């Protein structure tokens, strides 16, 4: 098998660890691996009775060879509390024991406790070990929830250290945003804004997953009245497998993190593309095939996005990538561009570009079909479509973060808990102003105006309200 670039995944905190468990279970199935990392006969290219077709699987991008021919994920799981790590250890035999790191402490839903943890040196040493075991390391994917103290704080500390230690490698974050409908801790709003500030500064690409949007998809598309956390993680795993499908399987665009970055990020700070995926079907749905026009209609539906945007706000796109997943003939593949051009007139309000970039719709094909998790709630399908778009509409997510942050910070509620851990109060204002500046940059990109100066209108809006 030809050598390809490799990636290291870092799963931080309870949310990142639980997502990682679902993600690597799915990736193992797609690559024809058993729970302990050994090859079986079926994978995403196999017919039910067909042989293992490993020639198209860039296995060493995500996996490394371990003892006795086992395949081991290039991944590290970290939590300051041992509970979630023990859950992974008990469920998955595919990881080596030194890939699962935990400590007997608790970040107590406090960004500062996570950020000022003393465990970063041991963590970076383990990351270095994984990096040295990679022939052609291209970058890192850091997965975390922004609401908790470990994912937000310790995750931000690791991200900062990665930026300093590996400045030329690509850093991608998968940031899970707490639901605005209900809150598990009073300090989620602080943690979310502080951690997003770190993603703005130190990540090259950030994929936001709003729990609110995932919950709605589980209810509306999968018919789950009371979705559980594993339902959300399974859905995220399917989507992130699609995002990276051309990297770890095969395809003609976005074959590396660097290519994803160059295709979707025109300015370094505006690196928050929105994802939309289709179809999302429950197990009782027996339809195994969707034509491209139907898939296109579904991914352009706001209900299939993992970030909830404001339907009343006119959005403008800076980049749009479509990734078709499934078996497709060359003639069918060549017809995708024509279908996109034709449908761009029908969906002109969804496919509008900012005035200063060419109207370039990139479309790619990954031949490996999607794979369901055992006893999962998402129906297996022979084809699927992923939309990745860098759109000004994503500013709605940052606005919601600030709307939760503002009233809490106006009263300085719970701030003393952060200051006791070593933070300075100015860091709260710095993070808030960074998000205000990011919103301004997206708004002014939509207008096609100069983005070099702060918008007094946006600044004053948050000063008045918060």
Image (cartoon, rainbow, N blue to C red):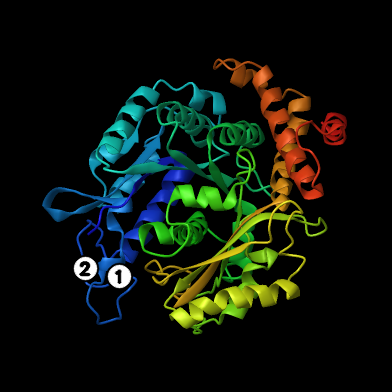
| In contact (CB < 8 Å): disc 2 and disc 1 | yes
Measuring from the top left, give residue 249's x and y in whole percent.
36, 63
Q: Is residue 26 above or below residue 409?
A: below
Q: Which mark is residue 40?
A: 2
Q: Which residue lies at the image location 60% right of the left edge and 33% below the top edge?
A: 191
Q: Is residue 95 above or below residue 248?
A: above
Disc 2/disc 1 C-alpha distance (Å): 8 Å
Measuring from the top left, give residue 83's x and y in whole percent.
38, 40
**Badge 1 local density, few (<14 within 10 Å), some, or many (20+)?**
many
Measuring from the top left, give residue 354's x and y in whole percent.
75, 54
In the figure, is residue 134 to the left or right of 292? Answer: left
Q: Nearer the viewer, residue 292 or 232?
A: 292
In the figure, is residue 394 to the left or right of 364? Answer: right
Residue 9 seen in the current view: no
Element assignment for label 2: loop
Q: Nearer the viewer, residue 261 or 225?
A: 261
In the figure, is residue 93 to the left or right of 110? Answer: left
User: Which residue is most to the left?
Assistant: 68
Please state, as top left, top right, bottom left or bottom right, where the N terminus lies in the image. Answer: bottom left
Q: Which mark is residue 315?
A: none
**Badge 2 local density, few (<14 within 10 Å), some, or many (20+)?**
few
Q: Which residue is mark 1?
A: 43
Q: Nearer the viewer, residue 161 or 354?
A: 354
Element assignment for label 1: loop
User: How many marks can you see?
Assistant: 2
Measuring from the top left, give residue 225's x and y in whole percent.
60, 66
Please state, as top left, top right, bottom left or bottom right, where the C terminus lies in the image. Answer: top right
Q: Is residue 286 above or below residue 36?
A: below
């Amino acid at each position: 098998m030809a050598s390809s670039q490799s990636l290291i995944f870092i799963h931080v905190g309870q949310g990142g660890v639980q997502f990682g468990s679902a993600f690597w279970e799915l990736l193992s199935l797609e690559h024809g691996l058993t729970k302990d990392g050994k090859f079986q006969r079926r994978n995403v290219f196999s017919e039910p009775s067909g042989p293992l077709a490993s020639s198209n699987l860039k296995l060493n991008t995500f996996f490394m060879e371990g003892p006795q021919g086992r395949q081991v994920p290039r991944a590290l799981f970290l939590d300051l509390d041992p509970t979630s790590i023990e859950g992974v250890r008990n469920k998955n035999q595919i990881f080596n024991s030194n890939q699962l790191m935990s400590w007997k402490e608790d970040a107590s839903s406090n960004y500062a406790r996570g950020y000022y943890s003393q465990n970063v040196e041991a963590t970076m040493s383990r990351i270095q070990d994984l990096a040295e075991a990679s022939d052609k390391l291209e970058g890192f994917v850091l997965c975390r929830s922004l609401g908790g103290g470990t994912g937000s704080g310790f995750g931000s500390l690791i991200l900062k250290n990665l930026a300093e230690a590996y400045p030329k490698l690509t850093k991608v974050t998968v940031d899970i945003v707490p639901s605005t409908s209900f809150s598990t801790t009073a300090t989620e709003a602080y943690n979310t804004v502080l951690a997003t500030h770190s993603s703005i500064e130190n990540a090259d690409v950030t994929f936001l997953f709003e729990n609110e949007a995932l919950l709605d998809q589980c209810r509306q598309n999968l018919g789950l009245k009371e979705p559980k956390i594993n339902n959300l993680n399974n859905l995220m795993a399917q989507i992130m497998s699609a995002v990276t499908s051309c990297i770890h399987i095969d395809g003609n665009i976005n074959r590396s993190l660097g290519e994803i970055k160059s295709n979707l990020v025109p300015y370094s700070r505006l690196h928050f593309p929105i994802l939309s995926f289709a179809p999302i079907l429950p197990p009782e749905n027996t339809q195994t095939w969707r034509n491209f026009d139907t898939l296109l209609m579904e991914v352009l539906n706001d209900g299939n996005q993992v970030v909830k945007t404001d339907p009343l706000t006119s959005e403008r796109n800076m980049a749009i990538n479509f990734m078709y997943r499934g078996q497709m003939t060359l003639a069918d593949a060549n017809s995708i561009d024509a279908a996109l051009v034709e449908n761009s007139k029908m969906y002109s309000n969804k496919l509008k570009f900012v005035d200063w970039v060419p109207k370039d719709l990139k479309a790619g094909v990954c031949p490996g079909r999607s794979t369901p998790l055992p006893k999962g709630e998402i129906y297996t399908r022979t084809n699927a479509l992923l939309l990745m778009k860098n759109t000004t509409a994503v500013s709605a997510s940052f606005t919601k973060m600030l709307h939760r942050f503002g009233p809490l910070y106006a009263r300085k509620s719970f701030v003393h808990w952060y200051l006791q851990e070593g933070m300075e109060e100015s860091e709260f204002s710095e993070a808030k102003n960074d998000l205000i500046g990011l919103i301004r940059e997206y708004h002014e990109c939509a207008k096609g105006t100069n983005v070099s100066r702060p918008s007094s209108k946006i600044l004053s809006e948050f000063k008045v309200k918060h």
